[in-house]
Image (cartoon, grey):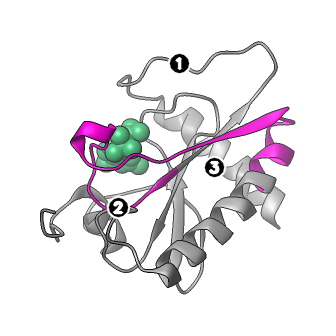
Amino acid sequence: MTAYDTDNIFAKILRGEIPSTRVYEDDDTLAFMDIMPRSDGHLLVIPKTPCRNLLDATPEQLAAVIATVQKMSHAVMVAFDADGVTVQQFNEAAGGQEVFHLHFHVLPRHEGVSVRAPGTMGDFDLIAQHAEKIKASLA
Ligand code: 5GP
């Protein structure tokens, strides 16, 4: 498998080299808003330590990330009065992965509402408002 690229976008976000809208972090993980949300409240959870995806992650990285995915799933259920949560995770280009730092997508969902098509940049102010709702539900 290709080696971890320390200049991937999420590594730069972790180092604070490019901005992100952070909603939660602990010693091992970071949760921040997806810049192209496929549902209102779409966020990403990543480990703070490097790994490309599920295929090279350690059990410790996976355990930390999935615990935060569960925490954030509860948070978006409350923040958006959601009916459910979709969790997605892609591995390597053939598996649909575009950013090569392990990440899980967390999307609050409502009955009868489809996710939006990928690739459309979200409204920054709206994403910021959604982040505040998520942070409030964690408090
Ligand atoms: P995947 O690798 O799982 O296919 O998708 C990567 C995800 O990262 C996409 O949902 C995309 O919208 C998101 N993304 C790509 N670049 C950035 C960025 O610079 N900032 C944030 N917050 N999200 C990004």
Residue ID at (82%, 44%): 77
The tag on residue 116 is 1
Quadrant (top left, top right, bottom left, bottom right) of the N terminus: bottom left
**Residue 20 in the figure: left or right of residue 125:** left
Viewer-proximal residue among 84 and 90:
90
Q: Earlier in the sequence, mark 3 or mark 2?
A: 2
State the image quarter where residue 137 is shown. Answer: bottom right
Residue underneath mark 2 = 53
Q: Earlier in the sequence, mark 3 or mark 1?
A: 1
Residue underneath mark 3 = 131
In whole angstroms, how far apart are the C-alphas of marks 3 and 2? 25 Å
Vertical placement of residue 131 versus 29, above or below: above
**Residue 101 in the figure: left or right of residue 103:** left
- What's drawn in magenta, residue-wise? 75-104
Residue 62 horizontal/vertical position (percent):
52, 72
Residue 51 horizontal/vertical position (percent):
31, 72
